[in-house]
Amino acid sequence: MKHFINLKDISSKDLRKILVDAKKRKNKRKKLNTLEVDKGAPLRGKLLIQMFEKSSLRTRLSFYLAIKQLGGGTLTLRSNELHLGEGGETLEDTAKILSTYGDGFMLRTDKDEKIEKFKKYLSIPIINGLSPSSHASQVLSDIFTVEEIKKKPISRLNIAWIGDSNNVLNSLIAASVKFNFKLNIGCPRNYKPKKFVLDWVKKNKKKVYIFNYAKKAVSNCDVIFSDKVISLNDKVNKRKKLSDFKKFKITENLISHAKKDCIFLHCLPRGSEVDEKVFFSNKSKVWQQALNRVHVQKSILLYCFGKLG
Protein backbone atom coordinates (compact mmCIF):
# COMPACT_ATOMS: atom_id res chain seq x y z
CA MET A 1 0.00 0.00 0.00
CA LYS A 2 1.40 3.38 -1.05
CA HIS A 3 0.42 6.79 0.31
CA PHE A 4 0.84 10.15 -1.43
CA ILE A 5 1.51 12.77 1.25
CA ASN A 6 4.83 14.57 0.63
CA LEU A 7 7.01 14.56 -2.49
CA LYS A 8 10.12 14.24 -0.34
CA ASP A 9 8.97 10.79 0.84
CA ILE A 10 8.44 9.35 -2.67
CA SER A 11 11.32 8.15 -4.84
CA SER A 12 12.32 10.13 -7.94
CA LYS A 13 11.75 6.97 -9.97
CA ASP A 14 8.13 6.62 -8.79
CA LEU A 15 7.42 10.34 -9.32
CA ARG A 16 8.73 10.07 -12.89
CA LYS A 17 6.59 6.95 -13.48
CA ILE A 18 3.51 8.92 -12.42
CA LEU A 19 4.34 11.70 -14.90
CA VAL A 20 5.01 9.27 -17.76
CA ASP A 21 1.69 7.51 -17.11
CA ALA A 22 -0.17 10.85 -16.95
CA LYS A 23 1.24 11.88 -20.33
CA LYS A 24 0.04 8.62 -21.93
CA ARG A 25 -3.40 8.92 -20.36
CA LYS A 26 -3.85 12.54 -21.44
CA ASN A 27 -2.93 11.67 -25.05
CA LYS A 28 -5.42 8.80 -25.10
CA ARG A 29 -8.29 11.01 -23.90
CA LYS A 30 -8.22 13.49 -26.77
CA LYS A 31 -11.43 12.14 -28.35
CA LEU A 32 -13.24 11.25 -25.14
CA ASN A 33 -15.90 13.28 -23.36
CA THR A 34 -15.47 14.46 -19.76
CA LEU A 35 -17.12 11.48 -18.03
CA GLU A 36 -16.18 8.76 -20.52
CA VAL A 37 -14.08 6.09 -18.83
CA ASP A 38 -10.49 5.28 -19.81
CA LYS A 39 -9.97 2.07 -21.76
CA GLY A 40 -9.81 -0.90 -19.39
CA ALA A 41 -11.38 1.10 -16.52
CA PRO A 42 -8.39 0.31 -14.24
CA LEU A 43 -10.18 1.39 -11.03
CA ARG A 44 -13.59 -0.11 -11.80
CA GLY A 45 -15.45 -0.82 -8.57
CA LYS A 46 -13.11 1.29 -6.42
CA LEU A 47 -14.37 4.06 -4.13
CA LEU A 48 -12.34 7.15 -3.25
CA ILE A 49 -13.62 8.93 -0.14
CA GLN A 50 -12.71 12.63 -0.03
CA MET A 51 -12.85 14.83 3.07
CA PHE A 52 -12.48 18.60 3.00
CA GLU A 53 -11.69 20.67 6.09
CA LYS A 54 -10.72 23.63 3.91
CA SER A 55 -12.36 25.27 0.89
CA SER A 56 -11.58 23.66 -2.44
CA LEU A 57 -12.43 24.06 -6.11
CA ARG A 58 -9.69 22.59 -8.33
CA THR A 59 -8.68 19.78 -5.96
CA ARG A 60 -12.30 18.76 -5.44
CA LEU A 61 -13.17 18.80 -9.16
CA SER A 62 -9.96 17.18 -10.37
CA PHE A 63 -10.04 14.23 -7.96
CA TYR A 64 -13.74 13.71 -8.73
CA LEU A 65 -13.02 13.53 -12.46
CA ALA A 66 -9.83 11.50 -11.94
CA ILE A 67 -11.50 8.58 -10.16
CA LYS A 68 -14.56 8.73 -12.48
CA GLN A 69 -12.42 8.58 -15.63
CA LEU A 70 -10.61 5.55 -14.20
CA GLY A 71 -13.93 3.74 -13.76
CA GLY A 72 -14.33 4.22 -10.00
CA GLY A 73 -16.57 6.36 -7.85
CA THR A 74 -16.19 9.01 -5.19
CA LEU A 75 -17.97 10.21 -2.08
CA THR A 76 -17.22 13.67 -0.67
CA LEU A 77 -17.48 14.36 3.06
CA ARG A 78 -17.12 17.48 5.17
CA SER A 79 -15.59 16.98 8.60
CA ASN A 80 -18.39 18.95 10.30
CA GLU A 81 -20.90 16.43 8.97
CA LEU A 82 -19.18 13.52 10.74
CA HIS A 83 -19.02 12.36 14.35
CA LEU A 84 -15.27 13.06 14.23
CA GLY A 85 -14.29 15.83 16.63
CA GLU A 86 -14.71 16.97 20.19
CA GLY A 87 -17.06 14.71 22.10
CA GLY A 88 -17.67 12.59 19.01
CA GLU A 89 -15.97 9.62 17.40
CA THR A 90 -12.21 9.14 17.72
CA LEU A 91 -9.99 9.59 14.68
CA GLU A 92 -8.89 5.95 15.05
CA ASP A 93 -12.48 4.68 14.85
CA THR A 94 -13.25 7.01 11.95
CA ALA A 95 -10.20 5.71 10.07
CA LYS A 96 -11.36 2.11 10.58
CA ILE A 97 -14.81 2.92 9.20
CA LEU A 98 -13.30 4.72 6.19
CA SER A 99 -11.10 1.68 5.55
CA THR A 100 -14.15 -0.60 5.76
CA TYR A 101 -16.24 1.34 3.25
CA GLY A 102 -13.66 2.86 0.90
CA ASP A 103 -10.59 1.89 -1.10
CA GLY A 104 -8.73 5.20 -0.80
CA PHE A 105 -8.97 8.41 1.25
CA MET A 106 -8.13 11.93 0.10
CA LEU A 107 -7.85 14.52 2.88
CA ARG A 108 -7.57 18.31 2.62
CA THR A 109 -6.75 19.56 6.08
CA ASP A 110 -5.41 22.45 8.15
CA LYS A 111 -3.32 20.11 10.34
CA ASP A 112 -0.33 18.05 9.17
CA GLU A 113 -0.65 15.90 12.28
CA LYS A 114 -4.12 14.79 11.21
CA ILE A 115 -2.78 13.27 7.98
CA GLU A 116 -0.11 11.39 9.94
CA LYS A 117 -2.70 10.10 12.42
CA PHE A 118 -5.00 8.91 9.66
CA LYS A 119 -2.05 7.23 7.96
CA LYS A 120 -1.34 5.35 11.19
CA TYR A 121 -4.88 3.96 11.54
CA LEU A 122 -6.05 3.56 7.92
CA SER A 123 -5.66 0.27 6.08
CA ILE A 124 -6.23 2.04 2.73
CA PRO A 125 -4.01 4.61 0.95
CA ILE A 126 -4.22 8.27 1.98
CA ILE A 127 -3.63 11.15 -0.42
CA ASN A 128 -2.78 14.66 0.75
CA GLY A 129 -5.15 17.08 -1.00
CA LEU A 130 -3.41 19.98 0.80
CA SER A 131 -1.99 20.49 4.28
CA PRO A 132 -0.20 23.41 5.96
CA SER A 133 3.25 22.12 4.94
CA SER A 134 2.56 20.36 1.62
CA HIS A 135 0.59 20.53 -1.61
CA ALA A 136 2.22 17.59 -3.35
CA SER A 137 -0.49 16.80 -5.91
CA GLN A 138 -0.52 20.42 -7.09
CA VAL A 139 3.24 20.64 -7.59
CA LEU A 140 3.62 17.26 -9.32
CA SER A 141 0.95 18.37 -11.77
CA ASP A 142 2.82 21.66 -12.23
CA ILE A 143 5.99 19.74 -13.16
CA PHE A 144 3.91 17.89 -15.75
CA THR A 145 2.65 21.21 -17.17
CA VAL A 146 6.14 22.72 -17.36
CA GLU A 147 7.54 19.71 -19.24
CA GLU A 148 4.51 19.57 -21.54
CA ILE A 149 4.91 23.20 -22.57
CA LYS A 150 8.71 23.36 -22.66
CA LYS A 151 9.06 19.90 -24.26
CA LYS A 152 12.11 19.05 -22.18
CA PRO A 153 12.86 17.61 -18.71
CA ILE A 154 12.51 20.15 -15.93
CA SER A 155 16.08 19.32 -14.88
CA ARG A 156 17.21 21.39 -17.89
CA LEU A 157 15.20 24.45 -16.89
CA ASN A 158 15.61 27.34 -14.45
CA ILE A 159 12.58 27.82 -12.20
CA ALA A 160 11.70 30.89 -10.14
CA TRP A 161 9.20 31.23 -7.31
CA ILE A 162 8.09 34.75 -6.43
CA GLY A 163 6.01 35.09 -3.28
CA ASP A 164 5.33 33.74 0.16
CA SER A 165 7.02 30.65 1.61
CA ASN A 166 4.01 28.38 1.93
CA ASN A 167 2.94 24.75 1.44
CA VAL A 168 3.13 24.99 -2.37
CA LEU A 169 6.69 26.31 -2.20
CA ASN A 170 7.63 23.56 0.28
CA SER A 171 6.50 20.97 -2.28
CA LEU A 172 8.25 22.83 -5.11
CA ILE A 173 11.48 22.79 -3.08
CA ALA A 174 11.06 19.03 -2.56
CA ALA A 175 10.47 18.67 -6.32
CA SER A 176 13.67 20.62 -7.08
CA VAL A 177 15.61 17.97 -5.15
CA LYS A 178 13.72 14.99 -6.62
CA PHE A 179 13.87 16.25 -10.23
CA ASN A 180 17.21 18.04 -9.91
CA PHE A 181 16.30 21.50 -11.24
CA LYS A 182 17.58 24.94 -10.27
CA LEU A 183 15.12 26.85 -8.09
CA ASN A 184 15.35 30.56 -7.31
CA ILE A 185 13.10 31.92 -4.57
CA GLY A 186 12.24 35.62 -4.48
CA CYS A 187 10.69 36.81 -1.22
CA PRO A 188 11.05 39.56 1.41
CA ARG A 189 13.78 39.00 4.00
CA ASN A 190 11.46 37.77 6.77
CA TYR A 191 9.50 35.34 4.60
CA LYS A 192 12.08 32.76 3.59
CA PRO A 193 11.28 29.01 3.80
CA LYS A 194 11.19 27.34 7.21
CA LYS A 195 14.43 25.95 8.63
CA PHE A 196 13.24 22.32 8.55
CA VAL A 197 12.61 22.64 4.79
CA LEU A 198 16.04 24.12 4.08
CA ASP A 199 17.72 21.60 6.40
CA TRP A 200 16.18 18.76 4.38
CA VAL A 201 17.56 20.26 1.15
CA LYS A 202 21.01 20.52 2.72
CA LYS A 203 20.80 16.95 4.02
CA ASN A 204 20.20 15.82 0.44
CA LYS A 205 23.29 17.74 -0.70
CA LYS A 206 21.24 20.12 -2.85
CA LYS A 207 20.69 23.87 -2.82
CA VAL A 208 17.95 26.43 -3.45
CA TYR A 209 18.78 30.06 -4.11
CA ILE A 210 17.00 32.74 -2.07
CA PHE A 211 16.86 36.37 -3.21
CA ASN A 212 15.33 39.40 -1.52
CA TYR A 213 14.96 41.09 -4.91
CA ALA A 214 12.40 39.76 -7.38
CA LYS A 215 14.35 40.81 -10.50
CA LYS A 216 17.40 38.83 -9.39
CA ALA A 217 15.26 35.77 -8.72
CA VAL A 218 13.69 35.74 -12.20
CA SER A 219 16.89 36.51 -14.09
CA ASN A 220 17.47 33.91 -16.84
CA CYS A 221 14.54 31.75 -15.69
CA ASP A 222 12.25 29.66 -17.92
CA VAL A 223 9.26 29.51 -15.58
CA ILE A 224 7.87 31.87 -12.93
CA PHE A 225 5.64 30.39 -10.24
CA SER A 226 3.52 32.40 -7.85
CA ASP A 227 0.69 31.96 -5.35
CA LYS A 228 -1.71 34.11 -3.36
CA VAL A 229 0.14 36.23 -0.79
CA ILE A 230 -2.76 36.19 1.66
CA SER A 231 -4.11 32.66 2.08
CA LEU A 232 -7.69 32.02 3.16
CA ASN A 233 -6.83 31.17 6.77
CA ASP A 234 -3.79 33.44 7.13
CA LYS A 235 -3.74 34.69 10.72
CA VAL A 236 -1.47 37.67 10.09
CA ASN A 237 -1.60 41.44 9.81
CA LYS A 238 -2.84 41.39 6.21
CA ARG A 239 -2.15 45.05 5.50
CA LYS A 240 1.46 44.71 6.65
CA LYS A 241 2.01 41.48 4.71
CA LEU A 242 0.66 42.98 1.50
CA SER A 243 2.93 45.98 2.04
CA ASP A 244 5.94 43.70 2.58
CA PHE A 245 5.26 41.97 -0.75
CA LYS A 246 4.64 45.18 -2.73
CA LYS A 247 7.93 44.84 -4.63
CA PHE A 248 7.26 41.20 -5.46
CA LYS A 249 4.24 41.68 -7.70
CA ILE A 250 4.36 39.78 -10.99
CA THR A 251 4.32 42.53 -13.61
CA GLU A 252 5.27 42.77 -17.28
CA ASN A 253 8.38 44.66 -16.20
CA LEU A 254 9.42 41.86 -13.84
CA ILE A 255 8.86 39.17 -16.47
CA SER A 256 10.99 41.14 -18.95
CA HIS A 257 14.01 40.20 -16.79
CA ALA A 258 13.39 36.48 -17.41
CA LYS A 259 14.00 34.58 -20.66
CA LYS A 260 11.95 35.74 -23.65
CA ASP A 261 9.97 32.50 -23.77
CA CYS A 262 9.38 32.40 -20.01
CA ILE A 263 5.95 31.16 -18.90
CA PHE A 264 3.90 32.11 -15.84
CA LEU A 265 2.12 29.59 -13.59
CA HIS A 266 -0.19 30.16 -10.62
CA CYS A 267 -1.95 27.44 -8.61
CA LEU A 268 -4.99 29.71 -8.01
CA PRO A 269 -6.99 31.36 -6.61
CA ARG A 270 -5.16 34.57 -7.45
CA GLY A 271 -4.97 37.83 -5.55
CA SER A 272 -3.20 41.13 -6.04
CA GLU A 273 0.23 39.45 -6.38
CA VAL A 274 -0.07 39.24 -10.19
CA ASP A 275 -0.93 41.99 -12.63
CA GLU A 276 -3.96 41.24 -14.84
CA LYS A 277 -1.91 42.02 -17.97
CA VAL A 278 0.41 39.14 -17.04
CA PHE A 279 -2.35 36.81 -15.83
CA PHE A 280 -4.26 37.07 -19.13
CA SER A 281 -1.18 37.26 -21.38
CA ASN A 282 0.07 34.52 -23.70
CA LYS A 283 2.85 33.82 -21.18
CA SER A 284 0.28 32.73 -18.62
CA LYS A 285 -0.56 29.01 -18.74
CA VAL A 286 -2.77 28.87 -15.65
CA TRP A 287 -5.81 27.24 -17.31
CA GLN A 288 -3.73 24.46 -18.86
CA GLN A 289 -2.04 24.08 -15.48
CA ALA A 290 -5.40 23.70 -13.71
CA LEU A 291 -6.79 21.12 -16.15
CA ASN A 292 -3.64 19.01 -16.03
CA ARG A 293 -4.36 18.20 -12.40
CA VAL A 294 -6.98 15.69 -13.55
CA HIS A 295 -4.47 13.74 -15.64
CA VAL A 296 -1.72 13.67 -13.01
CA GLN A 297 -4.11 12.83 -10.17
CA LYS A 298 -5.36 9.85 -12.15
CA SER A 299 -1.82 8.51 -12.19
CA ILE A 300 -1.38 9.35 -8.49
CA LEU A 301 -4.50 7.26 -7.77
CA LEU A 302 -3.13 4.37 -9.83
CA TYR A 303 0.16 4.63 -7.93
CA CYS A 304 -1.64 4.47 -4.59
CA PHE A 305 -3.87 1.58 -5.70
CA GLY A 306 -0.88 -0.41 -6.97
CA LYS A 307 -2.05 -0.23 -10.60
CA LEU A 308 0.64 1.99 -12.09
CA GLY A 309 2.39 0.48 -15.09
Image (cartoon, grey):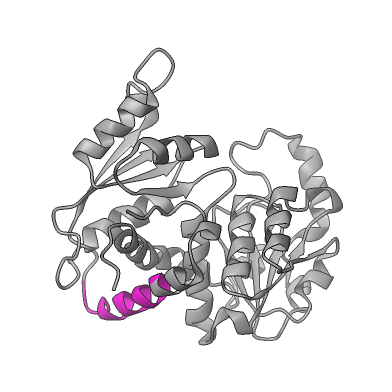
Q: Residue at x 54, y 84 (%)?
A: 150
Q: Main secondary structure of the magenta part?
A: helix
Front-lying residue, 247 or 70: 70
Percent from the top left, x then y, of residue 267? 54, 59
228 versus 180 height, above or below: above
25 versus 7 height, above or below: below
> Which image quadrant is residue 292 in?
bottom left
Q: Is residue 54 visible?
A: no
Magenta stretch encompasses residue 22: yes
Start and end of the magenta stretch? Answer: 18-32
Front-lying residue, 27 or 200: 200
Q: On the picture, is 282 further left or further right than 89?
A: right
Magenta stretch encompasses residue 196: no
2 versus 26 height, above or below: above
Q: On the picture, is 18 further left or further right than 232?
A: left
Quadrant of the drawing holding the C terminus: bottom left
Q: Residue at x 58, y 40 (%)?
A: 232
Percent from the top left, x then y, of residue 170? 63, 55
> Which image quadrant is residue 156 in?
bottom right
Front-lying residue, 80 or 9: 9
Percent from the top left, x then y, of residue 289? 48, 68
Farthest residue to the top: give it.
Answer: 87
Q: Residue at x 30, y 75 (%)?
A: 25
Q: Is residue 262 visible?
A: yes
Total marks in image: 0
